[in-house]
């Protein structure tokens, strides 16, 4: 801060030689000394409360709505005897953007829960949440109905959300994620078979007893003609 007693051409700033607080610490009284003229001293009053940082307005997420006409996949499932259908709607680039879940013999409570679950997943996908993150959050949740399924790629499901998200992963995620989730797609089965073959190679064909023969103490094979006639 410049000295108010000096001319503009003589300004060289000032230094603080004493600081005191007042008004419950909200104000600072500072005694300063001019750097150009040491005999010049003056007092300044400053606020001790730092101003609030400016608020940064975060961009709001944008919803990518589904096209009016789109392709979809409908899959029939059975988990522990509970049958139903999963319909996955896709964008033009083939990525999933919405799902619908309908049951054949579900009560009103389970039907309402599955409808709410499908709606939340659909909105999350349309607002840009990656499918891989949703799969990681909703798989391996155990509650009824659970049990054996009719899908050879997903032989057992811990719950309906677990089956639904693993089925979506089997259709829309890469092979590494499918193998991590235990989804036995044909590509995953082939990869597992190749890994097992490398880990446990088949033993080479051993020679048969006839080709190997038995040797006597003299080293000649038993049953062979003697060279001495």
Image: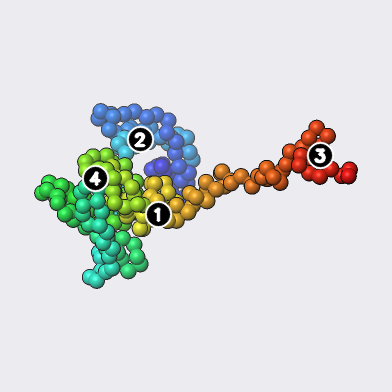
What is the spatial separation of the Cα atoms under label 3 and label 1, in whole angstroms?
A: 57 Å
Query: 162 or 125: nearer the eye?
Result: 162
The image shows residue 172 at horizontal and vertical percentages of 36, 58
Q: Is residue 84 above or below residue 226?
A: below
* Mark identifier at residue 80: 4
Query: 127 or 189: nearer the eye?
Result: 189
- Tell me which numbered mark, 2 or 4, is placed earlier along the sequence: 2
- Tell me which numbered mark, 2 or 1, is placed earlier along the sequence: 2
What is the spatial separation of the Cα atoms under label 4 and label 3, in whole angstroms?
A: 68 Å
Q: Which residue is mark 2?
A: 43
Give the class, few, some or many, for how many residues have Cα within 10 Å of label 2's Cα (few <14, many ≥20): few
Callout in the foreground (4, 3): 3
Q: Is residue 183 left or right of residue 157?
A: right
Report which quarter residue 89 is drawn in: bottom left
Mark 4 and 3 residues: CB-CB less than 8 Å, in contact? no
Q: Which residue is mark 1?
A: 185
Q: Is residue 69 left or right of residue 93?
A: left
Residue beneath the point at 25% across and 48% down: 79
């Amino acid at each position: 801060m410049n000295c108010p007693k000096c001319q503009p051409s003589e300004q060289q700033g000032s230094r603080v030689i004493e600081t005191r607080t007042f008004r419950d610490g909200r104000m600072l009284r500072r005694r300063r000394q001019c750097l150009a003229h040491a005999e010049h001293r003056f007092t300044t009053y400053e606020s001790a409360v730092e101003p609030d940082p400016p608020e940064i307005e975060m961009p709001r997420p944008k919803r990518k709505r589904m096209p009016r006409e789109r392709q979809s996949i409908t899959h029939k499932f059975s988990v522990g005897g509970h049958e139903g259908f999963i319909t996955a709607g896709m964008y033009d680039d083939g990525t999933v953007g919405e799902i619908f879940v309908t049951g054949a013999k579900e009560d009103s409570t389970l039907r309402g829960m599955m409808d709410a679950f499908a709606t939340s997943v659909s909105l999350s996908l349309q607002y840009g949440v990656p499918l891989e993150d949703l799969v990681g959050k909703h798989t391996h949740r155990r509650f009824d109905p659970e049990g054996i399924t009719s899908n050879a790629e997903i032989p057992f499901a811990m719950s309906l959300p677990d089956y639904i998200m693993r089925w979506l992963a089997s259709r829309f995620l890469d092979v590494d994620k499918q193998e991590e989730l235990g989804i036995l797609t044909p590509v995953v089965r082939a990869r597992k078979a190749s890994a097992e073959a490398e880990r446990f190679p088949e033993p080479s064909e051993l020679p048969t007893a006839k080709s190997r023969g038995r040797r006597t103490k003299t080293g000649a094979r038993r049953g062979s003609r003697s060279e001495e006639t």
